[in-house]
Amino acid sequence: MWTMLGLLVIVSLAWTAFVKPEQERQQAMADSGLVADSYTAYYQPSEQEEPQFLDGLKQFWAYTGFRNATSGHFVMIVIGLIFIFLAIRYEYEPLLLVPIGTGILIGNIPFFTDGGMNLQVGIYQQGSVLNYLYFGVLKGIYPPLIFLGIGAMTDFSSLISNPRLLMLGAAAQVGIFVTFIGALLVGFNMPEAAAIGIIGGADGPTAIFLSSRLANGSILGDGTTVKNLIGPIAIAAYSYMALVPVIQPPIMRLLTTKKERLIRMKPPRAVTKTEKILFPIFGLLLTCFISPSALPLLGMLFFGNILKESGVTKRLAETARTSLIDIVTILIGLTVGASTQADIFLTKESVLIFGLGAAAFGFATLGGVLFAKGMNIFLPEGDKINPLIGNAGVSAVPDSARVSEMEGLRCDKTNHLLMHAMGPNVAGVIGSAIAAGILLSYLG
Amino acid sequence: MQQLIISATTTGLDPLTWTIVIVGIGIVFIALLIVYIFFRYVLTFILNFRFRSFARKKGIDPAEIHNAKTIQSGEVNAAIAMALYSYFNELHDVESGVITIKRVSKNYSPWSSKLYNMKNL
């Protein structure tokens, strides 16, 4: 009975919505810029006695997702569902994977696009709501706002108390440049390779920022077309960030000895308020004078931190680290997810990007851990660094620091490395933003 | 440099690639190294200078102030903060210790009345 009732509702809705006089339909087509030939291919009014009802149903069918679906759409929907499952079941970066996963579902609902018809529904269709929201990704507006929030919630104390840990943040950026070379070797052009390389920074907003500037479908001066790789790069970056607890530990164990994993580090000293205020101010001036192209990211990061540490702008800091970053995370996650429309996302390039992304994370981890071991050669006994915190040089805040803590606890239940690992972790954010700035200054 | 160009040609990479890679890694390291030097030496020097001048004004031995500043490690601060947090957040009002069963009188409503249900109509 319910099935019959449902069918009746659908039929009546179809009748109300689609059965219109021919003149009105033509007018609507002209308004939406529809090419008449392609449309009439699906909608041919019959000349029988009761043509309108069947024609309306045919038109309704032509507009449904079932009629326009391809196997690619279903593949992407499954990927979206996996993202949501991972976020809910295993709590892998749920704040990112739930919006992205849902975005993938939204972006892969098939709709009528034959003949270039613009229903103003899809993310790539001008005038659609999603297209307006996607503007923030395309123009690199969201990433600096995310950095503002990150700055307002980051405590640089562990870095200030032990500033040599900054160098681990620099060492882990090796992953970016190794991947850059790898991407060039597999056939990407320079701007595309640079955008792919930044996945090694393990920083989603930075990856989106750089890919929106370098791999955005523009045409270079020599006539070469740069592919639009924002979607695959962002998805790869966020996916691997979520998989940090899976990717990093084997590499860390492989590169360190049991004795090194047991190293106890000195507790960080107390940091004064003056130092906390001076860090973002001088950090901003020093890093941005060296790499001005990183200004949108680093400027906002340190601005957020000044709001936090100044102590006189509590309301602003509170907004930046709660409401603002939440809103932008929702928008960025949803639109990046929705940008993975099957016809654009399921390409050979995406597969390559995912492969290179995995390598990028591996090399970044390797760079950080090996550099920590290298530093230990020169450090006196009793002041050595546990190389397990080297992996935290990839930004992925705070997941990679958490991995250091867990790996440390596996060897010694009383050796807590979290506080120490937060130093290279936030240094990695600064390092990856500087690297992005350099790539942008050469290729932007 | 000649070596770099030769290796770039053999691997099919543009020489600009190597420039970007070397300059890129170099600048990331230099930028963070400068920040390190600044906070490790310059800022420490400035803060120590401030402490010394403060001590001189007050007529105290600068070493004494320095010790007073560094004596509290992060762990001590964390322990104090935890104790304060536990104290203020786990406070309970004094409870009477009397357990009572409250009788709740049901207000009459025709909507829940058994007298007016369908069967009795």
Image: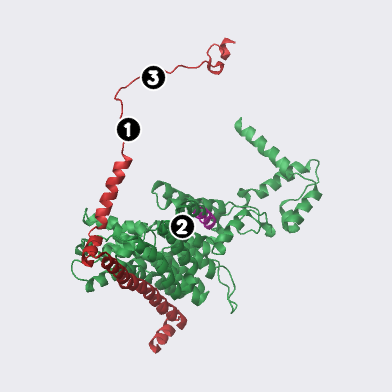
**Disc 2: which chain?**
A
Q: Amino acid at mark 3?
A: Lys
Q: Which residue position is annotated with label 1?
A: B93
Image-based side of A386 in relation to A427, left or right: left
User: Which residue lies at the image location 28% right of the left edge and 59% below the top edge?
Assistant: A270
Q: Amino acid at mark 2?
A: Gly
Among numbered discs 3 and 1, the one appearing first in the sequence: 1
How is the protein colored in the picture?
by chain
Q: Amino acid at mark 1?
A: Asp
**Disc 1: which chain?**
B
| Stretch in magenta | A328-337
Q: Are marks 1 and 2 in contact (CB under 8 Å)?
A: no
- Quadrant in the rendering for residue A34: bottom right
Q: Which residue position is annotated with label 3?
A: B102
Q: Secondary structure at mark 3?
A: loop
User: Which residue lies at the image location 40% right of the left edge and 52% below the top edge?
Assistant: A92
Q: CA distance from mark 1 to mark 2?
A: 38 Å
Q: Main secondary structure of the magenta part?
A: helix
